[in-house]
Image (cartoon, rainbow, N blue to C red):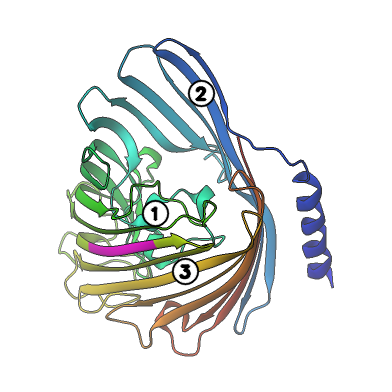
Amino acid sequence: MQKNIKFITITAISVLLLAPDSYAGGVTTKDGDKYLKIGGRIQIQYYQNNADNKESTDKIFFRRFRPYIEGSIHKNWKGKFQWDMGKAEDSNEIAVKDAYLQYKGFTNQKLTIGNKKTPFSQEFLTSSKKQQLVERTFVGDHNYGTPDRMLGIFLDGHSSDKNLTYSLALGNGNIDPDAKKLDFDTPANDKSDWNQGRTIAARVDYFPLGHYKFSQGDFKRKTRANIGIGAFSWKNDGDNNTYTSASGISKNAKKVDVDSVTGFEISGALRGGGFSVDAAYNIFNVDTIDPSFTGGIFKSGSTELKNWAIEGGYMIVPSKFELVAGYQAQDADNYAKQWTRTSLGANWYIAKHDIKVQFSYRVGRNTNGKAGSDRDELFLQTQYVF
């Protein structure tokens, strides 16, 4: 009964908070080549977790609370920094997100130095504020193989008609050692036990019907499509392997130091007639420093981690109300059975992606590859972007 009251309460609060029908576009001041832009996103989420043989739990929290500042005082140069206060805990009050300087004086190219998204997964490169499901699927989740933001140098470019885009990146990325996951994190928010390593990544996307920015949901009702491929390689630099002994044997059954990762993805999307569909497949070959380690996703010191997902929606009321669904699956060498998740939900767009309420119900089977280990999850999220 208490959980139902909480669910109804947050629904009511969401509706009251989001009632104004305005379109938030951020705040920009400009003087010639000089400008300053201030914005951010607020996502308030209610989450309920119903796992087999465990008591149901729920919570209300800031999923993301991210202000940002972007600006320029010199032609062709800009800087941006963004931070997240939604994950504040103990002494960790702020998580660094985007933090970089960028030069745009080249023809059809821009060069970026700093902390930025690794060019790999299309779903990860699609902003969290422009997703159809409340949470990303396996193919875009940094907990399951997709590299997070990295500190490095990035080159992004496109053809003259923008129908072909490409990205190259070289820098440092970290892995949070966990036998159950392949969890990438940025060095900008370092922890004492994270594996440190070098990353090189590249991505190419083709837009046969004209370029568009990655964003889920068909608001324009105009046919658009893209297909892309991405690849990366990560190698441990040997500086921080806290769970491996001097003899190369793991000291912890739940935490394991990763030696190397290579990843590949193919993805695509289609928009049109109110429909929006995204699909992707990625695969990661991973080695641990201990060649004998078995546990979680790893078997005898390695694993081939595979993810695939398809998700989509249809605007029942154009640009206002959308029904969504998704299916995702993950497999690894040490899994007894494939882990699957099926999602159903709905989105109420008050001002497109700027102001919206999202509901998703996710049915999980064989969680973490354990046969018969099931988990159902409920998500209700409000979003305001300015």
Q: Which mark is residue 311?
A: 3
Determine the CA span between mark 3 and mark 2: 33 Å
Name which residue lies at 20% across and 73% down. Answer: 301
- The local crowd at label 2, few if under 14, some if 14 to 19, many if 20 or more residues have their Cα within 10 Å, is some
For the C terminus, the image quarter is top right
Cα distance in 3D space between marks 1 and 2: 24 Å
Q: Inspect the image, locate mark 3, and give the three-letter code of the amino acid beneath it.
A: Glu
Looking at the picture, tell me which residue is in the foreground, 35 or 314: 314
Q: Which residue is mark 1?
A: 124
User: Where is residue 72, by image quadrant?
Assistant: top left
**Three-letter amino acid code at disc 2?**
Lys
Residue at 21% x, 41% y: name it. Answer: 159
Residue 17 among magenta residues: no
Residue 156 spot, x, y in % from top left: 24, 38
Quadrant of residue 85 within the rendered picture: top right
Q: Is residue 268 above or below residue 195?
A: below
Q: Tell me the crowding category of disc 1: few under 14, some 14 to 19, or many 20 or more residues within 10 angstroms, Cα based.
A: many
Q: Position of residue 58 (x, y in %)?
A: 69, 65
Going from N to C along the chain, the mark reached first, 1 or 2, is: 2
Question: Image height check: is 159 above or below 177?
Answer: above
- Dominant SS of magenta comes to strand
Secondary structure type for disc 3: strand
For the record, the magenta segment spans: 264-269
Q: Is residue 268 magenta?
A: yes
Residue drawn at x 22%, y 67% as measured from the top left? 286
The amino acid sitting under disc 1 is: Phe
Q: Which mark is residue 37?
A: 2
| Furthest-top residue in this view | 31
Sequence-wise first label, 3 or 2: 2
User: In the figure, is residue 226 to the left or right of 128?
Assistant: left
Question: Looking at this view, is 378 or 196 the one in front?
Answer: 378
